[in-house]
Image (cartoon, rainbow, N blue to C red):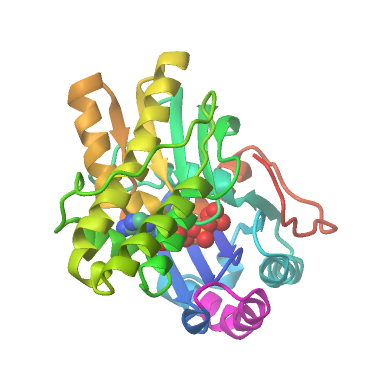
């Protein structure tokens, strides 16, 4: 089975080809236009997808070394994401599937972030059911109880900002360029995580809240800078380490709670923030401290990519779960 997968939910135009659960090609065109605006501009994202989608798909098919006619189905991201961005991938997938007369498969982007663990990779174990998925990205923060490839239940999620936003907004306060998450991570490695203390939010159950942290960072920085205009420059590493320590602490506290509540000790992380070194270390530590078994995906499968859309496409293909050609993109699309 050969699946061509298309992902265009936000600001990356991506295409991949899978042969069963094995990746043959994985192409991502990252849009640079948004950098100077300090965030993704939807109108520009949609336009850049229009420009990138044909070359990206061509390259994915060429690198897979197959012919279009070999394709068994086209999988695409139906949502969630930016409507203008999703529409580009959706329309393209529909026309291509129609032209080639092969099935069309709609994919939920958040489900794909979780099933990315099932792409066949040397040195990466696939999680066994049931497991808990912690999906941490620019738009989402969720704990999902996964009992089968398509049996997923969100048991906790953010009530305001996503964890990636907490990183990016804090970085912005520090004057770091967008996206600031990776930069906070970089400086955090060199700093003292106990240098400054930020209070953790009080949210019940397994839900998260990150908007308070952003405000706490803002007030703290404003106060310190008033006394010492060089405060950020002189303490950047310690500030970043302290912010990261707080965020990781919030995530680990809720995971501990989720494990206690469900009795499930297998934990798989996904989404862009799973690249973070602090969360990776904390999960590893959890293996010794709490007896967890943790799964961290290959880096390419953490941020937005089409390989993860393709693996969902593959499992749906096996179930003959095809979409009607009247299918449309959906900006808000829950698991
Ligand atoms: P969604 O999947 O919810 O639609 P998205 O696709 O925009 O959101 P991703 O591409 O999965 O999000 O992740 C991007 C986010 O990951 C950004 O907020 C970025 O700052 C953050 N990020 C990436 N690397 C790191 C890192 N090392 N440490 C912290 N955050 C990081
Ligand atoms: Fe994503």
User: In the image, 165: left or right of 232?
Assistant: right
The residue shown at (67%, 64%) is: 82
Q: Give the range drawn in magenta.
A: 38-58
Q: Residue furthest front?
A: 227
Q: Nearer the viewer, residue 318 or 152?
A: 152
User: Which quarter of the rendered picture does the C terminus lie within?
Assistant: top right
**Is residue 47 covered in magenta?**
yes
Q: Which residue lies furthest to the right in this view?
A: 326
The residue shown at (42%, 46%) is: 270
Is 109 situated above or below 296? Answer: below
Is 9 situated above or below 207? Answer: below
Is 157 situated above or below 228? Answer: above
State the image quarter where residue 88 is shown: bottom right
Magenta stretch, overall SS: helix
Give residue 45's position: percent from left, percent from top.
61, 77
**Is residue 215 covered in magenta?**
no
User: In the image, 128: left or right of 93?
Assistant: left
Regarding residue 46, the answer to whether it shows in the image is yes
The residue shown at (39%, 64%) is: 222
The residue shown at (60%, 33%) is: 150
User: In the image, 188: left or right of 101?
Assistant: left
Give residue 231's position: percent from left, percent from top.
25, 68
Regarding residue 127, the answer to whether it shows in the image is no
Is 54 situated above or below 137? Answer: below
Give residue 298's position: percent from left, percent from top.
31, 52
Total numbered labels placed on residues in the image: 0
Q: Which of 280 and 169 is in front in this view?
A: 169
């Amino acid at each position: 089975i050969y699946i061509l997968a298309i992902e265009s939910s936000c600001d990356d135009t991506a295409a991949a080809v899978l042969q069963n659960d094995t990746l043959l090609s994985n192409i991502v065109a990252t849009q640079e236009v948004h950098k100077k605006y300090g965030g993704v501009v939807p109108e520009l994202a949609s336009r850049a997808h229009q420009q990138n989608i044909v070359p990206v798909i061509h390259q994915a098919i060429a690198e897979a070394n197959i012919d279009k006619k070999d394709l068994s189905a086209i999988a695409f991201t139906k949502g969630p994401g930016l409507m203008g961005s999703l529409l580009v991938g959706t329309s393209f997938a529909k026309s291509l599937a129609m032209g080639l007369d092969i099935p069309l498969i709609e994919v939920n982007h958040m489900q794909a972030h979780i099933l990315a663990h099932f792409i066949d990779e040397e040195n990466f174990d696939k999680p066994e059911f049931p497991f808990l998925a912690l999906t941490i990205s620019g738009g989402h923060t969720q704990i999902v109880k996964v009992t089968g490839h398509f049996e997923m239940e969100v048991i906790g999620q953010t009530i305001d900002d996503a964890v990636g936003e907490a990183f990016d907004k804090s970085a912005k306060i520090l004057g770091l360029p967008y996206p600031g998450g990776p930069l906070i991570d970089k400086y955090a490695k060199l700093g003292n995580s106990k240098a400054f203390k930020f209070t953790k939010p009080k949210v019940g159950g397994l839900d998260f809240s990150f908007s308070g942290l952003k405000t706490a960072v803002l007030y703290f920085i404003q106060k310190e800078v008033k006394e010492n205009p060089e405060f950020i420059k002189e303490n950047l590493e310690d500030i970043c380490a302290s912010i990261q320590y707080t965020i990781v602490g919030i995530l680990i506290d809720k995971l501990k709670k989720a494990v206690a509540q469900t009795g499930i000790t297998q934990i798989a992380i996904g989404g862009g923030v799973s690249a973070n070194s602090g969360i990776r270390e904390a999960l590893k530590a959890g293996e010794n401290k709490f007896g967890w078994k943790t799964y961290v995906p290959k880096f390419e499968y953490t941020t937005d990519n089409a390989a993860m859309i393709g693996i969902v496409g593959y499992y749906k293909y096996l179930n003959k779960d095809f979409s009607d050609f009247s299918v449309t993109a959906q900006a808000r699309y829950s698991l």
